[in-house]
């Protein structure tokens, strides 16, 4: 499979315009990544996952529109402990963390327009309400 589908470089890099694109999320940089950005979008993926390979370029494309947001990719094969702690059972899964609070988690690849809409909702979300009530209600993520 590796010969058919080239591996994407998921390290932090600049594109041709100088904008920051996605970076790899690992156990080593997890805490720092969550703490250093108000909004963090996490793409849980694996190299063998077809829908993950389809969603990856969309995730990277949308990241270029939002340089103030951390767009990170977590390889569920390499970082099984984090994936288990996040209760990831299907991939791809997109998780949004705002001000350290998980506000959205959903499995499945999204089109760019839906991802942009989620970002708009995450930006508008007041997480102080979630903190007061212990997070989103079961089955009721923050932005939808």
Image (cartoon, rainbow, N blue to C red):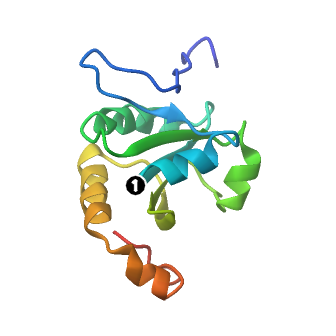
Write down the quadrant of residue 75 in the picture: top right
CA neighbours of label 1 inside 10 A, class few (<14), some (14 to 19), many (20+): many
Q: Residue furthest top?
A: 3
**Residue displayed at 61% across by 30% down:** 47
Q: Residue furthest right?
A: 81
Front in this rendered view, residue 56 or 67: 67
**Which quarter of the image is occupied by the N terminus?**
top right
* Residue 112 visible to the viewer: yes
Measured as percent of width and height from the top left, residue 60 is found at: 37, 33
Q: Secondary structure at mark 1?
A: strand
Q: Is residue 5 above or below residue 91?
A: above
Write down the quadrant of residue 19 in the picture: top left
**Which quarter of the image is occupied by the C terminus?**
bottom left
Count how many numbered circles sit on residues in the image: 1
Q: Residue furthest bottom?
A: 133
Front in this rendered view, residue 22 or 57: 22
Which residue corresponds to mark 1? 39
Measured as percent of width and height from the top left, residue 57 is found at: 38, 31
Write down the quadrant of residue 126 in the picture: bottom left
* Residue 92 visible to the viewer: no
Q: Is residue 33 above or below residue 133?
A: above
**Residue displayed at 44% across by 33% down:** 22
**Residue displayed at 71% across by 42% down:** 79
**Residue displayed at 53% across by 25% down:** 11
Measured as percent of width and height from the top left, residue 17 is found at: 24, 19
Q: Is residue 92 above or below residue 16?
A: below
């Amino acid at each position: 499979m590796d010969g058919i589908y080239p591996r994407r470089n998921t390290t932090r890099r600049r594109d041709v315009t100088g904008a920051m694109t996605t970076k790899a999320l690992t156990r080593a940089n997890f805490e720092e990544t969550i703490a250093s950005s108000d909004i963090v979008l996490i793409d849980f993926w694996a190299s063998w996952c077809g829908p993950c390979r389809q969603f990856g370029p969309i995730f990277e494309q949308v990241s270029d529109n939002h340089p103030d947001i951390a767009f990170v990719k977590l390889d569920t094969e390499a970082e099984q402990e984090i994936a288990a702690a996040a209760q990831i059972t299907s991939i791809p899964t997109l998780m949004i963390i705002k001000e350290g609070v998980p506000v959205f988690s959903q499995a499945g690849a999204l089109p760019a327009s839906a991802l942009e809409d989620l970002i708009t909702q995450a930006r508008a979300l007041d997480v102080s309400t979630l903190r007061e009530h212990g997070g989103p209600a079961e089955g009721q993520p923050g932005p939808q």
